[in-house]
Image (tube, rainbow, N blue to C red):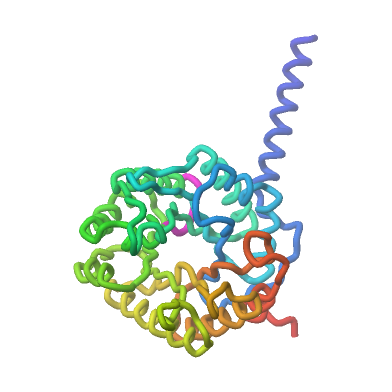
């Protein structure tokens, strides 16, 4: 009798486990979200921007379950259909990479699952901040070590059904130009071996380094062409913005270049991998200025039929715009269907 009871308990526990797993993996239908208006095929947002650099608590701070749920709901409520997630690393003068891959995998896996449960797709990339590599070269990069990380995250992307992947951001200025020219060509077929989704590059198309590597068609075969846009203008050595006309002209110039790249590499997938705003009169723009600037830039992107965009700072979150909802409200006017 005891044996029969134990067997029934095991069967019951197995049934409960299966039930809760089924519930966990179903699309979330408990919340009503407004209907999305498709201005771009990819209406993307940055997941988090709490730090440009890796720190030991970064994943528990920005990818904890309650924060994930809250952010994804905000993204749905403004009409986004993609979120950009990064695996963070810091570098050193000697070329080492500093990060916590175990914690990163655990945290990003949960974040991706939540996003997918809300029908939001994922753009994933390993990330190391370019500011320390260019133009002063404070850090160096061991290209072999970076390649190992890229392929590791490409495998992770495949395992977790990630829809879009980049082998880093702004690698064209992080690496030595000779290294970069070779690397962009050789890394693509290696990624293809382990990842079956779409692959994009995400670069700043600026300066001699870019011209050197791009003239050799190093991006041949990538599914999407992607650039980052952080408009600036040089005022007596101060690189910032002082008018919306400056911003519009810079964005137009970069988007024209993006479309030229799309034609050159024969792809209709043309994305602004990050759209941000640098300094405004020497300091971070206010949320109100940022909302106006993004709105103007999105007008330009729409005019040039860009496939998609990922906005940098957008959310009323402590690591982004504090309590301000200015950008969120602006996005609703563009990416949410009118209830008329």
The residue at the point 59 percent across, 60 percent down is: 120
105 over 178 or under it: above or below? above
Residue 116 percent location from the top left of the image = 59, 55
Residue 336 seen by the camera: no
Nearest to the observer: residue 133 or residue 213: 133
Q: Give the range drawn in magenta.
A: 159-165
Give the left or right position of residue 326, taking residue 52 as reference. Answer: right
Residue 16 place in picture, x, y as percent: 73, 33
Total residue callouts: 0
Q: In this view, does 249 lie above or below 101?
A: below
| Quadrant occupied by the N terminus | top right
Q: In which quarter of the image is the C terminus?
A: bottom right
- Of 120 and 216, nearer the camera is 216
Q: Does the magenta stretch include residue 235?
A: no
Q: Could you say which is closer to the camera, residue 101 or residue 220?
A: 101
Q: Which residue is drawn at 71% across and 32% down?
A: 15
Q: Position of residue 117 (x, y in %)?
A: 63, 54
The single residue placed furthest to the bottom in the displayed view is 245
For the point 53% across and 76% down, which residue is it?
A: 282
Residue sitting at 63 percent across and 71 percent down?
A: 79
Left or right position of 193 against 34: left
Question: Can residue 96 be spotted in the picture?
Answer: yes
- The image shows residue 211, relative to residue 18, as above or below, that is below
Image coords of residue 253 (percent x, y): 38, 84
Residue 176 relative to residue 315: left or right: left
Dividing the picture into quadrants, the one containing residue 202 is bottom left
């Amino acid at each position: 009798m005891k044996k029969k009871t134990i067997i029934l308990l095991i069967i019951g526990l197995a049934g409960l486990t299966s039930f809760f797993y089924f519930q966990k993996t179903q699309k979330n239908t408990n919340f009503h979200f407004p209907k999305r208006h498709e201005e771009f095929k990819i209406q993307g947002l940055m997941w988090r921007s709490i730090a440009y650099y890796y720190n030991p608590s970064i994943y528990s701070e920005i990818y904890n379950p309650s924060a994930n749920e809250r952010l994804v709901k905000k993204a749905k409520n403004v009409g986004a259909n993609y979120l950009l997630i990064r695996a963070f690393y810091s570098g050193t003068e000697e070329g080492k990479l500093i990060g916590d891959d175990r914690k990163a995998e655990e945290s990003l896996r949960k974040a991706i699952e939540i996003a997918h449960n809300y029908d939001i797709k994922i753009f994933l990339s390993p990330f190391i901040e370019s500011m320390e590599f260019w133009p002063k070269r404070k850090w160096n990069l061991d290209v072999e070590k970076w390649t190992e990380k890229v392929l590791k995250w490409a495998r992770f992307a495949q395992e977790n059904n990630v829809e879009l992947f980049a082998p880093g951001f702004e690698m064209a200025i992080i690496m030595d130009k000779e290294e970069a020219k070779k690397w962009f060509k050789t890394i693509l077929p290696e990624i293809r071996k382990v990842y079956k989704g779409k692959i994009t590059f995400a670069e700043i198309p600026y300066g001699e380094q870019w011209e050197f590597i791009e003239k050799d068609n190093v991006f041949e075969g990538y599914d999407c062409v992607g650039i980052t846009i952080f408009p600036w203008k040089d005022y007596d050595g101060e690189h910032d913005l002082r008018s919306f006309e400056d911003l519009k002209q810079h964005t137009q110039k970069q988007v024209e270049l993006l479309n030229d790249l799309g034609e050159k590499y024969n792809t209709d997938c043309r994305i602004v991998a990050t759209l941000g705003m640098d300094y405004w009169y020497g300091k971070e723009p206010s949320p109100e200025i940022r909302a106006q600037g993004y709105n103007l830039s999105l007008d330009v992107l729409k005019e040039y039929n860009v496939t998609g965009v990922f906005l940098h700072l957008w959310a009323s979150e402590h690591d982004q715009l504090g309590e301000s909802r200015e950008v969120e409200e602006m996005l609703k006017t563009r990416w949410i269907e009118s209830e008329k």
